[in-house]
Image (spheres, helix red, strand yellow):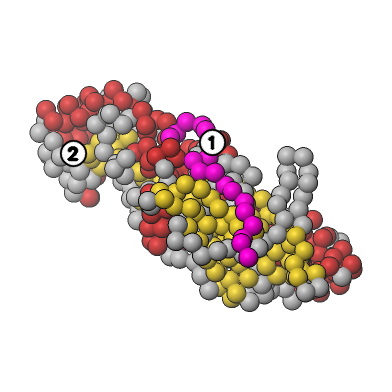
Amino acid sequence: MTSLALHTDHYELTMVQAALRSGAAGRRCVFEVFARSLPGRRRYGVVAGLGRLLGELPRFRFDAGACEFLAAANIVDAATVDWLAGYAFTGSIDAYAEGDAYFPGSPVLIVEGTFAECVVLETLVLSVLNHDSAVATAAARMVCAAGDRPCIEMGSRRTHEEAGIASARAAYIAGFSSTSNLEAGRRWGVPTTGTAAHAFTLVHDDEEAAFAAQVAAFGPGTTLLVDTYDVEAGIRRAVAAAGPALGAIRLDSGDLVSQAHRARALLNELGATSTRVVVTSDLDESAIAALAAAPVDAYGVGTSLVTGGGEPTAGFVYKLVAYRSGDGWRPVEKRSAGKASTGGRKTPARRLVGGVATGEQVWLDGAPERADERPLLTPAVRSGRVVGGADVASAREHCRRALAELPAEAMKLSAGEPAIETRWEKAPR
């Protein structure tokens, strides 16, 4: 098992050293993860990555190799290295269910434990949630733009190899139908798909030979890439090779709107009326929306998806909001210009009227039980032991339900204000 402990920032460990000396290291604390705003002025975000984070917690250990590096590089002193060598998170984590929508200010994850054990988790927590939630948010917008047409994730070659796997997982939770990434299929159970690239056509003497070989290997239900040379000629050769039962053609270049119309007309003329038209080529939610009236059956999305649709982070921050003092909790908050935080532990809920979300209610000092509110936090870790989280299929279903709660305003692709307002209120006594 490879340790993830050094996948963190230098200053997390220097804070531990100083806190060990001041006595604050063992002080009971509450940290919250929230976004100050929605990147790109989007109208909602989608939380993803909790399952990955909970799976990585057991690997967050300072093994012998990590401790040797810290000592040799003089990152922290010997006493701190000794403390880190015995590190294991023993606190608790509450979190939004994976796949839920989120809005500014509301805590999507709450970590409670000693200052030292919580602070060293900051980089791991943020790197997982910021990446996966950015991808899931972009994916959800693309799925919305696509309507009932499936979206295929195919961005592995556009990002880091592990990020590609995480992206496929996040996209599937947010509604994509499948991925080209085989490890995402093995590790997370995401359906995989794929047939051939232009190289397969080019390695054969001509397009007829390439199509004949692919049909011989996979049957007439395969998808043939028809734009290596001439699209119209490619479609004719594809139907000649597979017959009218050809599964699909793929278009990967040019003006996809006009190409799709011409392709559909030609396929119908050739008797291939059930052959689907799949389009790829640098698609994003705007391009997908522009294809809404075109005879397209599925979209393949790569670069824009794995880079969060131009917003590669969800904007989450990890802030100390309270610590234990005497018999109670002392709220603490930042007052930095433009980066202020609200102190005290909070309990978020989604206010619903007739099944439609009307507000994000963040309760301070507890929360009342209300029939018109859906509590948002679920137990994830207790005393260092994972007790929550959901499988990918359950997270996908939760995402579908959570997005269905949002008002129609949320589904607009244009920049704007959050679809629902976040309100803070002290719980009634």
Q: Nearer the viewer, residue 401 or 176?
A: 401
Q: Quadrant of the C terminus?
A: bottom right
| Residue 188 locus on image (x, y percent) | 43, 61
Q: In terms of secondary structure, where does tag 2 sit?
A: loop
How many residues crowd mark 2 within 10 Å: few (<14), some (14–19), many (20+)?
A: many
In the picture, the quarter occupied by the N terminus is: bottom right
Instruction: Name the mark nearer the viewer: 2 or 1.
Output: 1
Q: Which residue is mark 1?
A: 417
Magenta stretch encompasses residue 327 = no
Q: Residue at x 61, y 67 (%)?
A: 93
Percent from the top left, x then y, of residue 109? 60, 59
Horizontally, residue 418 falls left or right of residue 213, namely: right
Q: Which residues are magenta?
A: 412-429
- Looking at the image, which residue is at 54% across and 36% down? 417
Residues at marks 2 and 1 touching, judged by CB atoms closer than 8 Å: no
- From the viewer's side, name the closer residue of 319 and 428: 428
Q: Is residue 414 magenta?
A: yes
Q: Identify the residue at horizontal 78%, vertical 44% (top origin).
A: 336
- The answer for how far apart the CA atoms under marks 2 and 1 are is 41 Å
**Residue type, numbered disc 2:** Thr
- Residue 372, picture quadrant: bottom left
Q: Amino acid at mark 1?
A: Glu
| Residue 341 position within the rendered picture, expressed as x and y whole percent measured from the top left | 71, 49
- Residue located farthest toward the front when viewing the structure as drawn: 429
| Viewer can see residue 142 | no
